[in-house]
Image: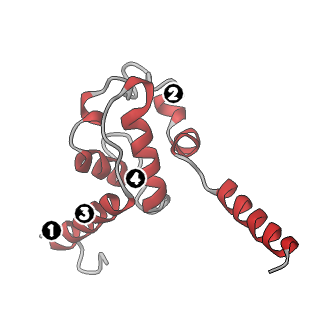
């Protein structure tokens, strides 16, 4: 293969990688307005993520919260894909001195399927919910 073709292919790979958002970028775009870039939140309005035991606890509970929202928090189930959700959840579980294990896109997908299944099975769910 000619060198210029290899160089062009490597360049395309680098460009594709540059377009991938990392957890910090996903957080900045979707979460920082409420939880602040420092993870400190806004007392009385939005909880701090820095040092938060819930955030560092059961990963499935955190994934469910980010997918479905809670209190005044919006749902991100439709607007952020599993890979990006895994990145942002891993970021908040490990940012600002938090020391929890990261989550994988497969873990997010599994929780998403559980949440979707439980919504379909709820007795009060509309017949045409899905």
The residue at which mark 4 appears reads as 75
Q: Is residue 96 above or below residue 30?
A: above
Query: From this viewpoint, is residue 112 visible?
Result: yes
Query: From this viewpoint, is residue 41 visible?
Result: no
Residue 99 horizontal side relative to residue 36, left or right: left
The residue at which mark 1 appears reads as 122
Q: Residues within 10 Å of mark 1 (few under 14, many from 20)?
A: few
Q: Quadrant of residue 77?
A: bottom left
Residue at image location 36% in from the left, 55% down from the top: 104
The mark nearer the N terminus, 3 or 1, is 3
**Closer to the eye: label 1 or 2:** 2
The quarter in which the N terminus is drawn is bottom right
The mark nearer the N terminus, 2 or 4, is 2
Residue at image location 51% in from the left, 27% down from the top: 36
Real-space CA distance between mark 2 and mark 4, rounded to the nearest whole angstrom = 18 Å
Secondary structure beneath disc 1?
loop
Q: Which mark is residue 110?
A: none
Real-space CA distance between mark 3 and mark 2, rounded to the nearest whole angstrom = 28 Å
| Most distant residue in the top direction | 43
Q: Is residue 17 above or below residue 123?
A: above
Q: Which mark is residue 36?
A: 2
Residue 5 horizontal side relative to residue 27, left or right: right
Real-space CA distance between mark 3 and mark 4, rounded to the nearest whole angstrom = 12 Å
Real-space CA distance between mark 1 and mark 2, rounded to the nearest whole angstrom = 35 Å
The mark nearer the N terminus, 3 or 2, is 2
Q: Which mark is residue 115?
A: 3
**Closer to the eye: label 3 or 4:** 3
Secondary structure beneath disc 2?
loop
Residue at image location 25% in from the left, 34% down from the top: 54
Looking at the picture, how far across and down is residue 107, in whole percent?
30, 59
């Amino acid at each position: 293969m000619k060198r210029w073709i290899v160089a062009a292919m490597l360049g395309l790979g680098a460009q594709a990688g540059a377009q991938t958002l990392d957890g910090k970028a996903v957080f900045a775009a979707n979460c920082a307005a409420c939880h602040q870039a420092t993870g400190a939140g806004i007392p009385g309005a939005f909880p701090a993520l820095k040092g938060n035991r819930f955030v560092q606890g059961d990963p499935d509970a955190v994934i469910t919260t980010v997918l479905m929202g809670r209190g005044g928090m919006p749902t991100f189930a439709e607007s952020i894909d599993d890979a990006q959700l895994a990145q942002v959840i891993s970021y908040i579980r490990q940012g600002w001195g938090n020391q929890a294990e990261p989550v994988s896109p497969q873990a997010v997908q599994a929780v998403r399927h559980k949440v979707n299944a439980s919504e379909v099975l709820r007795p009060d769910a509309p017949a045409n919910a899905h």
